[in-house]
Image (tube, rainbow, N blue to C red):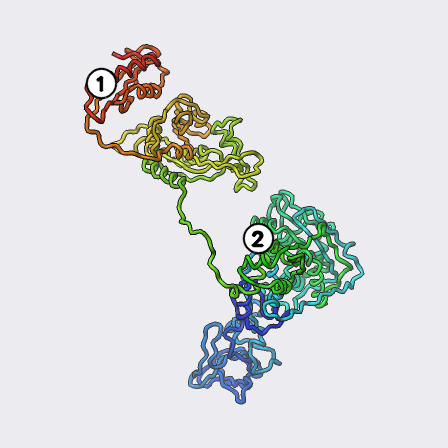
Amino acid sequence: MQVSIKWLNDYIKFNETAEELADKYTMSGVPVENVIRADEGLDKVVTGRIEKLEAHPDSDHLQICQMNVGEPELIQIITGAQNVAEGQVVPVAMVGAHLPNGLHIKKGKLRGLPSNGMLCSAEELKMDLTKLTEEEKNGIYILPADTPVGVPAKDVLGLDDVVLEFDLTANRADCFSVVGLVREAAVLTGNEPHYPEISVKEDDEAKAADMIKIGIESDLCDRFAARVIKNVKVGPSPEWMQQRLEGAGIRAINNVVDVTNFVMVELGQPMHAYDYDEIAGHSLTARLAKEGENLHTLDDSSRIAKGTELVIADSEKPAGLAGVMGGLESEVTEKTTTIVLEAASFNGASIRRTSRACGLHSEASGRFERGVDVTAIPRALDRACQLLQEMGACTVTQGMVDVYPKQKDQTEIHYTAEQINARLGTQLSAAKMMEILTSLGFAVQTEGEGFVAKVPTWRNDCTCMEDLSEEVSRIYGFDNIAPTLPWGAVMQGKQSPRQDFIDKIKEILVGLGMTEELSFSFTNTDLLDKMLVPADSELRKAVPIMNPLTDDYPLVRTSLLTSIMENAVRNFSRKNMDLRLFDVAPVFFPKQLPVTEQPEEVVKLVGLMTGRRNTVGWNQTNDMIDFYDMKGLVEELLASLSISKYTVEAGEHFALHPGKTALFKKGREVIATLGELHLQAAENFGIKQKVYLFEMDVEVLMKYTAKNFHFDSLPKFPATSRDLAIVVDKDAEAGKIEQVITKNGGKHFKSVTLFDVYTGEHVAEGKKSLAFNLQFQSKDKTLTDEEADTAFNNILKAVEKQFGAELRA
């Protein structure tokens, strides 16, 4: 938003310089980014008349000008311009001038004759060349013959303005208008504003309601109003209006368009002008676009509607994108004689979405996004008609067509002086607060021991006591509020124990050759289907996302397995077939659907291994990763986390291969699940090689990690080992046999290791041979063979009894 000081001065007079006013605005929360002076470098440029012109005696192109610049004597200036003549009035840069183009004017000589200044062209004065004819652009700029001499050229050329460039925050929609900025200036300077008097003479006998029908078919439009003007004469707007629009950064087009832009900047209400004869059915309706409709806008671009855009439509087609840009077919042209002026209030979020989706941003959309004063719409329409009437460009029909289905209630805020003082750290009186709020347009009344403030209709950003306190503080002056240090308990920032534990897991797995992946917290039912998640599983009770980033991920994930498999497939598609991935991230379980409270967040750990066991090399084998590589990795992770005394047994998991799934347990609680990806799941993902997965719950791991440690001295006495080879049923689990061995090994038992599994010759059908290495050791002495044999025999008897084991010869 930018506006010229001249425009502000039209409605309020102030003694402050532009820089001082800009500082007041900024310190009150209406920041001014730049102060742009159109007269920069024109301090010593005046008007001058060429009283005498003669050729230079020593040059074939230089001319000697005797200039009248309002001083007692003529000054001599030598110029090379060929478009000057005696009697012309031109801009003259006096000695000492610093022109906008950087040129410094000094006394000098040209071919031996003195020259005391320079005649100026439009380009040297940095004038707007787009408004000039080709003749005016070339050579010295010639002023009208009746221009007085010796006066500052900036006054004559209209370059005496200063533009304030505001960097407004989104909440201050009221300041996106000259009237809104004048309101602020009145409070900041203490001067009285004088707003334009708006009155319309309805000088045409026709009635607007008979000529145009207005309708609203979407709750995204709060109010929709229109006036009809006839006998329109489209032409250039007055010079003063063009200058005001130029100061606001808007290019003048014609009187109709310029008036709508002028009112938009002046009052903050965008509006649009339609050629009445191009409106099918002579009706305009605010409605949602129909999917597939063609949206042909003023920039001569066509877009296909998605069905979510708000449009202004006639009886046949959209006549414009509501709040963003009008339609090309109903554009006002020089042939237009009857115009419908339309003004409305639209839902800001809807306009913002449409503007971004279409890649269109306009002055109008920027204001609608922030919100307009819905009660000021009739005033804006009347103002536009008034301005066109004053130009003699139209007649105005009787009445206004206004559709306003739900009247806006005025917001009321209850507060006490103590509340505001407590929040600001001030000791302001209630009377002072009332004075400030009243000056800003709030209607304040006492209510018991407190007050109630009625918010003006143009301040949509004020809804609560905290907003009122901000209004009081910014006008009272932030510099006048004593600074105080906030009080609070001093706490050292650090990670939680769970965060430290997760970091430790990541460090261990990276050290084991794994790579951490990062994934989105979203999923879809297709991924759950591919992972063979049962229909009645809790994993399918996922939280739906109201506004998903894409239609492909409408759910919040309940399992990390879907995420890691997606990443694996993405790697496979890029020919990266050797993977060791892991992910530590939260999954989310709703307590009920639809969601009424915060879902439960559970941090899970998953890992994936597939491909070659070793890196490619001449001295490496091409063996593929198998189940025991993954099992060994999980065992190493648990050991590094100081989790011990767990059992490993065969188990089941919907996504893993039956018979190739293991459960790590502490008591009855599963601390890890690992196995080979189910063949059907692999086929669903299009994977043609074996993939191994593990899944753990971080909270469960934390629960079982050792908290207290004790250290044993190195053993002074050697260990004794025995090998136990037994034949058992083929379905007997080695893990359970190890549990029995450990339980019956006696006080000197140290460890058991399975080192051989054999089926085949010399082993009966339905049987298998397991060979274990048993270690015995005492802290106090060297064990005798008899002591080791006794322990060995106890173990043998126990496995014979519980598993029907036979000692293998």
Mark nearer the viewer, 2 or 1: 1
351 and 242: which is toward the camera: 351
Mark sitting on residue 360: 2
Look at label 1 and name its amino acid: Glu
Instruction: Tell whether 266 sits left or right of 425.
Output: right
Ranked by sequence position, the earlier of labels 2 and 1 is: 2
Look at label 2 and name its amino acid: Leu
Q: Residues within 10 Å of mark 2 (few under 14, many from 20)?
A: few
State how many labels appear. 2
Q: Which residue is mark 1?
A: 787
Examine the rendering and report whether any part of residue 610 can be seen.
yes
- Residue 554's place in the image compared with 737, above or below, is below
Q: Position of residue 223 (x, y in %)?
A: 69, 52
Q: Are marks 2 and 1 in contact (CB under 8 Å)?
A: no
144 and 209: which is toward the camera: 209
Rendering quarter of residue 374: bottom right
Marks 2/1: CA–CA distance = 90 Å
Furthest residue in direction front, as rendered: 449
Furthest residue in direction bottom, as rendered: 72
Which quadrant is the N terminus positioned in? Answer: bottom right
Examine the rendering and report whether any part of residue 253 can be seen.
no
Q: Position of residue 219 (x, y in %)?
A: 67, 47
Q: Position of residue 258 (x, y in %)?
A: 64, 63
What residue lies at 77% left-to-right and 54% top-to-bottom? 209
